[in-house]
Image (tube, rainbow, N blue to C red):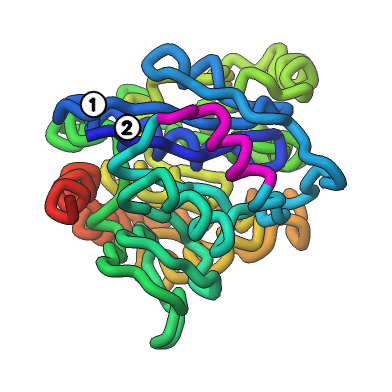
């Protein structure tokens, strides 16, 4: 099986799309597939990370007449992008194309089918229209019937299809480490995109609480030096830059604090409750749905919150051990860590 992935990461988009595609790509390769990525070298891209495992075809950073997107959902010129992909792959044809990109929609999907037999679209914006063979949305959907108008031969919806790396299943089966420290351990993560400013705004309020803090950021963050200065003389806080050990960190934590996104299902697999706000439009519905399902406290849109809102929510939740225990149970019931296997098997069946 030959598989082409079309995905980007940037300071605006974050890295969640790339990370879940890498998880799927590794699982496909383990089943004998040949995998190629096509990406744009945008500011904050993850091309070097992808190249550690797979061939990456480099696409133009901008196309004629295109403005740099200010939101993750900003449209990309479908004709120009698909032509660039076609030129990069040459005469090669693929059994599957995997598209994980808010900026590329129905027109791009029609064009790519000229050199790909099957199309898998990964999305979490239910109002978008698609024409594909396989549609994957790993979120809890609280939208009415009629979501995702258009053709999709097979739909895989819900957290049981979450694309999680093998280490999450590994840590899920281990007992939580015994805490010899009375202070709760809290993990802070505000996404891999242009959200570190929000972290800088919230962090001082949490440093004033009796907590052990693990703070996760991407390596390309310009705010890194400001964070390091803020954490000087704060032995209870540890900064983790571009970590490859998210599963280990989540396994050891008592509470997650930060943004929604793909990390939601990583921590659900390990039974980690959360205090969450939406940092982008696509995080709002899923964050609200997860709160209603009992996985987390949802504070709303991050730009409308004050640091004290975060501090109060964290303090109140940590003071309710029975509620935390129920959140852990609800989370692990939703996600078992085997979603990527189910997706790969569906791709194989459709071929």
Question: x and y percent of residue 298 in the render?
Answer: 54, 63
User: Would you identify the image quadrant in which residue 80 lies?
Assistant: top right
SS at badge 1: helix
The majority secondary structure of the magenta stretch comes to helix
Q: Are marks 2 and 1 in contact (CB under 8 Å)?
A: yes
Against 115, residue 147 (above or below) is below
Q: Name the secondary structure under disc 2.
A: helix
From the viewer's perspective, is 92 left or right of 242?
Answer: left
Q: Residues within 10 Å of mark 1 (few under 14, many from 20)?
A: some
Residue 293 appears at what percent x and percent y?
35, 70
The dot on residue 25 is 2
Q: Where are the magenta residues, as a range?
A: 80-91
Q: Is residue 90 magenta?
A: yes
Residue 227 as seen in the image, left or right of residue 134: right
The residue that disc 1 covers is 29
Question: Does residue 323 appear in this view?
Answer: no
Name the spot of residue 206 as percent of width and height, x first.
Answer: 64, 39
User: Badge 2 local density, few (<14 within 10 Å), some, or many (20+)?
Assistant: many
């Amino acid at each position: 099986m030959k598989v082409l992935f079309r995905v980007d990461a940037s300071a605006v988009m974050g890295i969640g799309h790339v990370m879940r595609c890498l998880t799927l790509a590794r699982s496909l390769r383990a089943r004998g597939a040949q995998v190629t990525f096509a990406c744009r070298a945008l500011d904050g891209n993850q091309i070097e990370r992808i190249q550690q495992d797979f061939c990456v075809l480099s696409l133009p950073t901008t196309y004629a007449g295109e403005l740099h997107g200010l939101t993750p959902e900003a449209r990309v010129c479908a004709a120009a992008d698909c032509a660039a992909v076609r030129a990069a792959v040459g005469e090669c044809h693929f059994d599957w194309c995997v598209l994980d990109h808010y900026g590329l929609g129905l027109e791009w999907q029609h064009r790519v089918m000229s050199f790909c037999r099957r199309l898998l679209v990964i999305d979490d914006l239910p109002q978008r229209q698609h024409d594909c063979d396989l549609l994957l949305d790993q979120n809890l959907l609280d939208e009415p019937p009629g979501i995702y108008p258009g053709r999709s031969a097979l739909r895989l919806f819900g957290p049981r299809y979450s694309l999680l790396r093998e280490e999450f299943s590994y840590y899920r089966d281990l007992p939580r480490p015994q805490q010899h420290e009375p202070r709760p351990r809290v993990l802070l993560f505000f996404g891999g995109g242009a959200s570190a400013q929000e972290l800088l705004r919230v962090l001082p309020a949490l440093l004033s609480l009796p907590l052990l803090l693990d703070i996760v950021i991407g390596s390309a963050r310009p705010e890194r030096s400001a964070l390091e200065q803020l954490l000087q003389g704060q032995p209870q806080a540890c900064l983790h830059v571009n970590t490859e050990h998210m599963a280990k960190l989540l396994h050891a934590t008592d509470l997650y604090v930060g943004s929604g996104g793909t990390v939601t299902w990583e921590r659900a697999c390990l039974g980690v409750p959360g205090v969450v706000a939406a940092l982008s439009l696509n995080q709002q519905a899923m964050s609200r749905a997860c709160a209603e399902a009992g996985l987390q406290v949802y504070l709303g849109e991050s730009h409308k919150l004050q640091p004290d809102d975060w501090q109060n929510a964290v303090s109140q939740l940590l003071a309710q051990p029975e509620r935390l225990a129920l959140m852990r149970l609800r989370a692990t019931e939703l996600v078992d860590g085997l979603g990527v296997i189910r997706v790969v098997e569906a791709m194989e069946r459709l071929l």
